[in-house]
Image: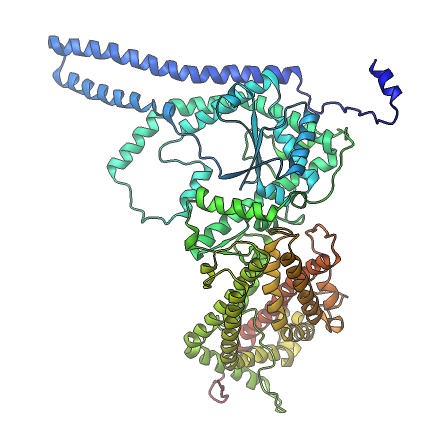
């Protein structure tokens, strides 16, 4: 009958229902049933153990009391038995602790509704339909790296079977739509419907309870440990004998529950891993084998990024500067393809087999669905930047227990300490520059063109004297110059922070203006404060130029020694550098002239990057006008930054490109293109700006390394000591 109906209405397309992707074989279901039975039996045996010990103590107490009443046995022996009995009673009473153990503290989360995120709930509906499951009743976004499917608290979750899906905001910000769908499908598929799903809930709940109960009062789980490390630590004192005895007592009393916890995990692990393999197979059928491997690798990268962000937050707490958008920081901290090791494993969860085994288990599975979606998941969601900021502040306040009044929220680009490979390289380069100049020269300030040119041709001896003279001068002026350098850095940092606050005020993003030294969150007040910080930078820069001139003399003298020393006297390392010095020097001089433009671009880039693709009312006139002004400024400054560099050779070894071509090369981390040409151009200029700063630090560090090596071999290792007095240093 349905066939006739469809034939009679040819204008209505027939909906072909694709087959369910999740397949749980009978042996897997039986394994889950057996795991639920054995884990439940272990928990029951713990209760039976408590009852058995209690009955034995009552009988023992009756027997001991009878002996004492009749005066039988040795008095000392009876007293010792009484003391041992009291200790046993206390131990037995402490064994009841797992019965009232508190559940693990949940991540601070933000519940989203279907009316606010229709695209996300539409994807969840597609996933649930392909798995043959009911869609989650609610979705909660938290600061984490993974996804967790939980039962809704109360009777609706226990009897009604309603579920809530907890999604880590870092996962949505760092993955594409295709890979995000694969992650959500995998998480939901690990809890099938029916009795198998009920047994899975039982196994998970009992394992979690056993794990919490087996932990000592002196131990914490990973989340609690991270929270404990964020607060100010008290001075640690060596534990006394009473505390050691107490720890030993707790350790002994918790051995039974500890053994049962390990035994339960050992029995449940095969069943949970079998469910994980079924979920992996369902994801592979949804995405395809190659896309499954990419999705799994990207999820591992997100886990690494979240760990890096955790260490960055710890450093930010000490410095009272916290990133205002953790999801954006995690996206920047994700390891690139060249950083990711081939043998990454997911050992954090007992439900997942090793990475290699997971890939081998889905080999040969072809894609069984026509669904395909490109683009970033964050771009698909509405107001993702606003949601990320809200979750970030909830994590700080509820998760870490911080008072945001005591901290300044800064742009993601201003947060350092994630431990990424590129950041470590940049830190090593700036550390080398700081070490050579004794901390008196900032890596982002130019050190070129300060010395007045002279027609005098110095000799090798003159250059050695110049190096030694400046060294002595630095020792006497280091404290004085260090104060001015610190003042310049603080003004430069405040300028960048204020640019972000100014941009937020123009587009309507709320911010605590008092953290930035401004009375109200108004653009005019921020502009006035930015002008003051620019003036402080100019005054500090003028004062530093007087002190930078001797440093430039020493720098140029050390490099001149490499060029003027005969080849036979040069060490092998310096001889190899001599050919590259003119190229490095040319690139450094051209880039140093453009540093004021770089400062402007960096301040704008960090602010625009922090604002994200959304975060205010994009349809408002203020938002559109701000974006137009920003795009115009970026276009003007970007042209000034790279114009003329097409004639400068790339300082990288064995490179045939110009410096401009290198700066314009695409990065290893692909960014989703923007549909607006002006926004796409701005994103490209921001990328080139960060490339310029990276290459400048690289060239500066190369020259500093050559100068440092020259002083070691050609000044300190010279045949005879050279006095420093003949050369005067003007400062």
Left or right of residue 135, residue 38 in this image? left
Q: Which residue is drawn at 19% across and 12% down?
A: 64
Q: Which of 503 and 37 is in front in this view?
A: 503
Q: Which residue is drawn at 68% across and 34% down?
A: 122
Q: Which of 49 and 186 is in front in this view?
A: 186
Q: Is residue 337 visible?
A: yes
Q: Which residue is drawn at 61% across and 26% down?
A: 190
| Residue 129, image quadrant | top right
Q: Is residue 357 visible?
A: no
Report x, y in % for residue 312.
50, 51
584 shown above or below 284? below
Report x, y in % for residue 710.
57, 74
Report x, y in % for residue 298.
65, 42
63 shown above or below 621? above
Left or right of residue 414, residue 645 in this image? right
Report the colour scheme: rainbow
């Amino acid at each position: 009958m349905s066939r006739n109906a469809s034939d009679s209405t040819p204008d209505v397309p027939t909906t072909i229902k694709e087959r369910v992707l999740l397949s749980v074989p009978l042996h897997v279901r039986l394994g889950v049933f057996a795991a639920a039975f054995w884990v439940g039996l272990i928990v029951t045996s713990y209760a039976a153990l408590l009852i058995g010990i209690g009955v034995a103590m009552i009988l023992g107490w009756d027997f001991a009391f009878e002996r004492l009443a009749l005066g039988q046995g040795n008095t000392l022996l009876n007293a010792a038995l009484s003391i041992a009995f009291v200790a046993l009673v206390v131990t037995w009473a402490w064994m009841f602790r797992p019965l009232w153990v508190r559940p693990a503290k949940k991540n601070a989360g933000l519940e989203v509704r279907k009316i606010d995120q229709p695209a996300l709930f539409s994807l969840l509906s597609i996933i649930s339909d392909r798995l043959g499951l009911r869609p989650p009743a609610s979705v909660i976004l938290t600061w984490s790296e993974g996804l967790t499917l939980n039962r809704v608290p109360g009777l609706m979750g226990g009897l009604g079977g309603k579920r809530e899906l907890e999604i880590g905001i870092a996962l949505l910000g760092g993955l594409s739509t295709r890979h995000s769908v694969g992650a959500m499908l995998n998480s939901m598929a690990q809890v099938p419907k029916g009795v198998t799903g009920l047994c899975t809930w039982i196994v998970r709940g009992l394992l979690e309870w056993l794990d919490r109960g087996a932990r000592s009062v002196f131990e914490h789980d990973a989340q609690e440990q991270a929270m404990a490390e964020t607060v100010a630590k008290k001075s640690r004192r060596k534990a006394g004998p009473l505390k050691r005895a107490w720890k030993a007592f707790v350790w002994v009393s918790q051995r039974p529950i500890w053994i049962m916890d390990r035994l339960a995990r050992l029995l449940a692990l095969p069943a949970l891993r079998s469910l994980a393999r079924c979920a992996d197979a369902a994801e592979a059928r949804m995405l395809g084998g190659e896309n499954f491997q990419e999705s799994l690798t990207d999820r591992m990268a997100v886990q690494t990024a979240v760990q890096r962000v955790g260490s960055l937050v710890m450093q930010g707490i000490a410095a009272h500067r916290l990133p205002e958008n953790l999801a954006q920081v995690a996206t920047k901290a994700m390891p690139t393809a060249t950083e990711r090791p081939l043998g990454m494993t997911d050992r954090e969860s007992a439900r997942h087999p090793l990475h290699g085994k997971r890939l081998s288990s889905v080999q040969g599975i072809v894609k069984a669905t026509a669904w395909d979606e490109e683009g970033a998941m964050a771009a698909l969601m509405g107001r993702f930047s606003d949601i990320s900021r809200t979750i970030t502040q909830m994590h700080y306040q509820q998760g870490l227990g911080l008072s945001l009044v005591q901290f300044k929220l800064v742009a993601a680009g201003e947060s350092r300490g994630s431990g990424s490979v590129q950041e470590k390289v940049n830190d090593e380069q700036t550390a080398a520059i700081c070490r050579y100049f004794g901390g008196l020269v900032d890596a982002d300030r130019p050190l070129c063109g300060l010395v007045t040119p002279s027609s005098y041709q110095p000799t090798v001896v003159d250059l050695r004297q110049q190096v030694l003279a400046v060294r002595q001068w630095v020792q006497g002026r280091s404290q004085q110059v260090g104060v001015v350098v610190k003042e310049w850095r603080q003004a430069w940092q405040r300028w960048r922070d204020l640019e972000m606050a100014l941009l937020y005020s123009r587009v309507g993003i709320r911010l605590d203006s008092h953290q930035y030294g401004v009375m109200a969150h108004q653009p005019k007040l921020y502009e006035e404060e930015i002008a003051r910080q620019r003036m402080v930078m100019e005054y500090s820069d003028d004062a530093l130029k007087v002190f930078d001139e001797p440093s430039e003399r020493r720098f140029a003298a050390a490099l001149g020694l490499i060029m003027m020393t005969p080849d036979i006297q040069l060490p092998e390392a310096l001889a190899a550098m001599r050919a590259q010095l003119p190229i490095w020097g040319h690139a450094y001089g051209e880039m140093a002239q453009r540093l004021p433009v770089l400062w402007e671009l960096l301040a704008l880039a960090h602010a625009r990057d922090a604002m994200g693709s959304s975060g205010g009312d994009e349809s408002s006139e203020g938002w559109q006008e701000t974006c137009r002004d920003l795009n115009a400024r970026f276009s003007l400054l970007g042209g000034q930054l790279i114009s003329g560099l097409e004639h400068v050779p790339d300082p990288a070894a064995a490179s045939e490109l110009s410096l401009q071509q290198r700066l314009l090369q695409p990065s290893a981390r692909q960014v989703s293109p923007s549909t607006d040409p002006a926004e796409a151009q701005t994103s490209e200029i921001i990328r080139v700006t960060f490339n310029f700063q990276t290459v400048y630090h690289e060239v500066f560090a190369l020259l500093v390394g050559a100068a440092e090596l020259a002083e070691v071999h050609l000044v300190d290792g010279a045949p005879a000591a050279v006095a420093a007095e003949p050369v005067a240093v003007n400062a």
